[in-house]
Image (cartoon, coloured by chain):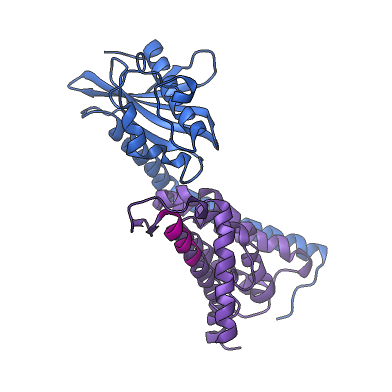
Chain colours: A purple, B blue
Amino acid sequence: MNNMQNFTKGFFKENPVLVQLLGMCPTLGVTSTAMNGLGMGLATTFVLLMSNISISLVKNFIPDKVRMPAYIVIIASFVTVVDLVMSGYLPELHEKLGLFIPLIVVNCIVLGRAEAFASKNGVVSSIFDGLGMGLGFAMALTMLGSVRELIGSLSLFGFKLIDADGILLFILPPGAFLALGFLIAFINHLRKTA
Amino acid sequence: MAKKESTLFNMVSSLVIVTLVASTTLGYVYELTKGPIAEAMLAKKIKAIDEVVVAYDNNPVDEMYKIQVEGSKDSLEVYPAKKEGKLVANAIRTFSPKGYGGDVWLMVGLLPDGSINNLAVLEHKETPGLGSKMNNEDFKNQFLSKNPSSFNLKVKKDGGDVDALSGATISSRAFGQATQLAFDTYMKGGQHE
């Protein structure tokens, strides 16, 4: 598989959210607005990229039996870096995503890519894989956030489109499941017909 | 290069190295972001104070003092806003533990006689779209320039004067409660001149 495929597979063919159904906790939890989805997606992309790079670099120095704790320490460190930097420089976004940032540690996409890809491949392909998967995750979260924000509060990225109340259900947790279900059905339809 | 074998020495040494590098990096990033984080929190506080008090020329954060809440261990922070040395308003950081999703923190601006100048929500975990609307002007406007000694801060359902947010009676109750706490505490223990 070449690097271009490593990169693009995260968007459509193996999209972590819409196809692999991984990382459902942040996906359903933070996507009440498009901006939250995008912020969470980009934070995860950063962690995924950095952890993929470091794990592919150190994979030969880490004995098999302790690879999981070692990977978790590496991932948790990058998550803490994101958490600190965000609360210092982007306090408003941090306030909204606050609870979910530490949860990136246990996001199975990050550990999944470390185990399934970075621990078996070189640095360059791991960079492409991390970027592709991360941006695919960000794309899915932004799409879901946009749909929920559009129906739930009739606005997009914070801009009010129609001055009225939306369908509240879509802002609440059940709306996340409904919107995600329709989104997956739509993507599956596209994949089958394409 | 071949993978290292899982001998005890290899396992222990590789984990020690990984954790050592990780903790050094984190210590460094922590030092780096300590300043900006403190600044961001201060900026947020000052913004909330500015929102709830009238024009002032002192530094309310430096003159902050605490008042013990009657019958509890908690104390509220009071930020006095002064103009030409005269007290014009107070921003009081207050809370209610009875929100729908936990604590609700407000910044309440009280004039020296105790009447409400303005309110700002600092922190809450209320339902988005229902309780979170307590930050809206429509809801807050009913409190402005009211004096809690004559304006009953309970919701109408409980015999008070507050129009509750629809679908969020508990949040509205907590909002009134926090404001009442700020008023009671300030009238009892605050500086009035």
Residue A82 visible here = yes
Q: Quadrant of residue B91?
A: top left
Q: Specify whether B61 is left or right of A115.
A: left
Q: Which residue ends up furthest to the right in the rendered image? A: B7
Q: Which residue is drawn at 62% across and 66% down?
A: A110
- Look at the image and tell me in which quarter the N terminus of chain B lies: bottom right
Instruction: Pick the residue in front: A171 or A134.
Output: A171
Please tell me which residue lies in front, B62 or B152: B152
Residue at horizontal 68 percent and vertical 78 percent from the top: A120
Residue B176 position (above or below residue B30): above
In the rendered structure, does residue B155 fall within the stretch colored magenta? no
Query: In x, y percent, where is residue A184?
Result: 58, 71
Quarter of the picture containing the C terminus of chain B is top left
Q: What stretch is highlighted in magenta?
A: A143-153
Expressed as whole percent of the image width and height from the top left, the position of residue A40 reads 50, 59
- Residue A21 at what x, y percent from top left? 64, 68
